[in-house]
Image (tube, coloured by chain):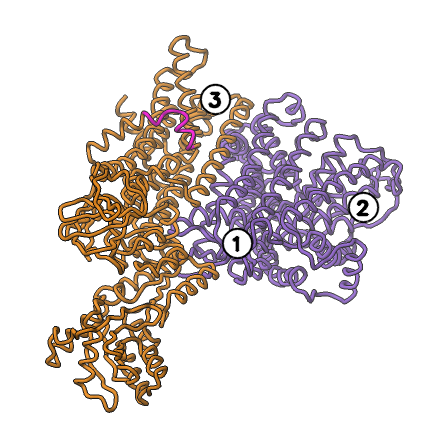
Chain colours: A orange, B purple
Amino acid sequence: MTIHPRPEISLLNKAILRQAAADSFNKLAPQRVMRNPVMFVVEVGALLTTLLWLRDLVAPAAGAEPLWFTGQVTLWLWFTVLFANFAEAVAEGRGKAQAASLKKMRREIPARKLVNGGEVQVPASSLRQGDTVVVEAGDYIPGDGDVIEGIASVDESAVTGESAPVIREAGGDRSAVTGGTKVLSDRIVVRITADPGDSFLDKMIALVEGAVRHKTKNEIALHILLVGLTIVFLVACVTLVPVAAYSRITLSTTVIAALLVCLIPTTIGGLLSAIGIAGMDRLIRKNVLAMSGRAVEAAGDVDSLLLDKTGTITLGNRLASELLPAAGVTLGELAMAAGVASVADETPEGRSIVAFVTKNFGLTEPSLHLEGAHFIPFSAHTRLSGCDLEGLSIRKGAVDAICQQVQSLGGEVPADLEEVVHRIGDAGGTPLAVSQGSRFLGVIHLKDVIKADIRERFVRFRAMGIKTVMVTGDNPRTAATIAREAGVDDFLAEATPERKMRLIMEEQAQGKIVAMTGDGTNDAPALAQADVGLAMNTGTQAAKEAGNMIDLDSDPTKLLEVVEVGKQLLMTRGALTTFSIANDVAKYFAILPAMFVMVYPEIAPINLMGLTSPRSAILSAVIFNALIIVLLIPLALKGVRYRPLGAAALLRRLVLVYGLGGLVAPFVGIKAIDLLLQALT
Amino acid sequence: MTVSGWLHIVIYGLVVLAVTKPLGIYLYRVFEDPKRPGPRVFRSLEALSYRLGGVNPEKEQTWPEYALALLLFSLAGVAATYALLRLQYCLPFNPQKLNPMPPDLAFNTAASFVTNTNWQAYGGEVTLSYFSQMAALAWQNFVSAAAGLAVALVLARGLTRRPVAPAGEGKATVGNFWVDMLRALMYLFLPVCLAVALFLVSQGVIQTLSPYLEITTLEGGAQTLPLGPVASQEAIKIFGINGGGFFNANSAHPFENPTPLTNLLQMALIFAIPAALTYTYGRLAGDQRQGWVIFGAMAFMFLVGAAVTYWAEARGNPALAGLPVNQLPGNLEGKEIRFGVAASSLFAAITTAASCGAVNAMHDSFTPLGGLMLLLNIQLGEVIFGGVGAGLYGMLIFVLLAVFIAGLMVGRTPEYLGKKIEGREIKLAMLYLLVFPLIILGLSAWAAAAPYALAALNNAGPHGLSEILYACSSAGGNNGSAFAGLNANTPWWNISLGIAMLFGRFWMMIPVLGIAGSMAARKTAPPSLGTFPTNGLLFMVLLVGVVLIVGALTFLPVLSLGPLLEEFLARQGRLF
């Protein structure tokens, strides 16, 4: 399936920027800033200096700082808060723009509700869980639900961005439909599964709007760190006043406020919430809906990845490539039985068997449809399918399951079976046995085709330190061959939903974070158990409910991108925190000499940057501190680029860029601003 | 600066390095090995003590239980020490008939010795009876060191233990306070101190209960020569990183520190336990490199500090630079000629880096930059080897912070030794971190603004500020050494510094125990390529960076008004 990213909403989208600029002022309200203690301290500082400026405007106190200086500092302190608000507003704005287009879909749709066999026209908003409705070509589906009757092509582009229509049919794993999507052909009956306000579309709107954003664990911990540092610097700045007074230096409130704001981690404090919002937004643009920020963070932490072989590692369709009849069975007999057992089987394997026997054995498809045949669908438990015909049961399925079936009916299993099965398994194929009553007829060789780019993806996972586990119903030999060819680290063969669940729990018991993808109803428990459960949008409602993320493109390999987004989110926070703290060194060297040099000119040598005047030095530091927030907004929104390098190499790189860079950048920046200020005056 | 001076530092470093592993293994065996080392009689005595004390050594405590035991034990220690000091006039072994200590000084001294600070606002020989020295102070020297060691062990256990089944928060056990205390005293402090005391006596350190001698000097003047049971107290003063001298002159006194050999031994013993604990920690973590990284970060910061101090002292006084003064021997003011500049600078760097407080020179007389390094050593949080246990647990808090800040950069929830670091640990770590600036800066600011505090100063200007800063840092950091130049025996200083010492000890220990408790309960994930490596050079660099930036930036403004300004003014020939 191709990935159709949502239309990129540019950073410089004028409408968003205009709205964000207005929002930054609305967000100045103290009760809103209070949620971010770092910025709240800045706002209090700005208020203080504003009052000072007003006082000096009316009646200048003796020894007060000049009006222009207090005014400038005040202005830039306010800008610091505004820039932080602006960052958050821009991040939110992108989500809001997307939400607006989704909201258009939530208009009133008439629904044709089935009541006692008859149709009644009701508004969609009156539908409740359990109601059934009829939808025909040209109608919008009035609510989330499962198709319980019929098959139809549905245009889901409004939700997924994918323009090609998809097939939705009763039963199986393609039964879920989403409210607001449009039926293009045929007629289906849908059982509604969500009450109004609780639908997929509603959740999606809330998600992209950021209305349901809760702080994640890491975010909370980081917040505590930032608040702690703020208090430490608050203590350092406030106590400096009497200590300076002892040294016969009078520090004005303006200067102390400037020093404090420069030292507290405003860069990361101002960008923290924007980073979080942008992370969710980035996922949404990759067409993945995360039900919580926690899930995104957990994605970054993933240690083990459980991937279904079929559809993820191999192409969905295993192709029948060879028929191996048992002793005493003719090739034609086996071909006929295989065809009859498969003709009503809509799985790709079934279809490929029918295609294989019709092509190579002169059979036609209608000739396989026998009168009175009763189709037995495949079940994960029996691992068999086939048909019953006049007391004759033709079965195909997993070799051991067929052997059991044959033996339970008193039949015998050919002696060379094991050898045949091994040969197929070693070739990476899957053996499928065919039986008729108690007779073992032979084996079909199903060939697995590994996806073209999957090997490279696993190399990337390995470089990230993530273990990949292939989950397959195949026997261990086949699984081993495919695992080797695809390059996965481990595999779970002969998997049942229970074994899959057990594997997840075992990994988790070792302290590992487990991710998996799934679409079927029998995946639901495992999806719920896994730390990151990525459900496919084409999957069943149960699977979508159980997972904590939904991929609208239904591409299982998307997990890689989800992991990268999760990592990026944490990396961006870490990088900006490191940068913010490292910045303090330079700011000290700008402001400290400026504070003391008037009384003690001897201290001039620690004015490393050679800033022109004390006031210009302080102002330059404050301006740098405010501007750096704006400059880093793009980085906060886009995220630090992730490279699958392994933690040690990644860390070296980022420490160099953001740690060392954070030490050096402000020296350059503050000096440049100082020169500019000099040139302007 | 001389070659032999630098060689002194190098040899000292090698001695410490040589002690680290064997003592580290010994400590591990004492506390974590069911077959403890040493003669069998130790184990019988240990078992007997448990029976007498009604302690079940198999039953471990949760962190709140452990903290409660520690606090009650320490509170009892403060009360008992206070009572003994107040009542010394009616207690035995008081040949000089010394009076009771005044209440404020007794409180200060009790707080000081219970917190392993050993700040001394008194002169030992004119204030304390032999009984007070032995029963009140030496006793606290032993148990306060053991308590610090116990807390470090608890944190190390919390970080390294792998819970079989995840226990609820606060349910995981972290050890038994009484067991840890008893083993520390019985297997470590008592035997080592006994041996060290005997060696010191062989070198000329006195050990007697006789009254002070009245002697006639060569010039014919009369002099009182104070005596006392010095060797027994000297050993634990150094090995327990307490630092409280028997005499006011501390390790500069020939009866405490008579020979170059005792000087080297004292310096080596100060770092012995904190260095060894890093090895013990590596063993607990199951990865020796985890321990060496911490050792490396400590050693690096120490060597830089020691080198700068030596350079500053050997360079001489900047104020005299232009004058016809021979500064070749360096700044000798306030230093014992028998030790010289190198051994004095090294001793000063060691005693401030480890929160010891024993001194063999007058720190007040160090050059501004030399004094700056000493102050910085304390203000970095006493994590450069640091106190017994306190150095390791302090550094581990910085480790957690470094892992948290930088760990996010590898794109995973930060984890240390496989355990995730969450909001609770950060909250407690920040609480720990907050104590330092709050006490040191808060108290310094108060003192700088209060005439009654300033009245105690001997020097004005930036040097006076350094004296205030040093006193507050020494108390808050539980160091105990004095810049001197400040008459600290006034009610205000005694009470405020006493409170500072108590906060600097227990406000820091409780968050540490809390972190140990929650980390002990946390699941351990096996390391992968994607986990943040904490056992390599890069992490060591990061750790040093975090200690310097988070630890030092707080103090840069006041330091620039104190020693830094003094240096610049001295260059212009101005003295204070």
The percent position of residue A182, horizontal first and vertical second, equals: 17, 46
| Label 3 SS | loop
Graded by Cα atoms within 10 Å as few (under 14), some (14 to 19) or many (20 or more), the crowding at tag 3 reads some
Residue depicted at 25% across the width and 49% down the height: A287
Quick one: quadrant of the C terminus of chain B?
top right
The residue that disc 1 covers is B522
Total numbered labels placed on residues in the image: 3
* Image quarter of residue A459: bottom left
Judge by depth and name the residue closer to the eye, A230 or A616: A230
Residue bounds of the magenta highlight: A26-36
- Which kind of residue does numbered mark 3 sit on? Leu
Look at the picture and state if A24 lies above or below A211. Answer: above
The residue furthest bottom is: A328
Graded by Cα atoms within 10 Å as few (under 14), some (14 to 19) or many (20 or more), the crowding at tag 1 reads many
Real-space CA distance between mark 3 and mark 2, rounded to the nearest whole angstrom? 50 Å
The percent position of residue A142, horizontal first and vertical second, equals: 23, 43
2 and 1 marks on the same chain = yes
Judge by depth and name the residue closer to the eye, A401 or A30: A401
Judge by depth and name the residue closer to the eye, A527 or B269: A527
* Image quarter of residue B18: bottom right
Judge by depth and name the residue closer to the eye, A190 or A329: A190
Residue depicted at 66% across the width and 40% down the height: B481
| Label 2 SS | helix
Say which mark, if any, is on residue A251.
3
The residue that disc 2 covers is B134
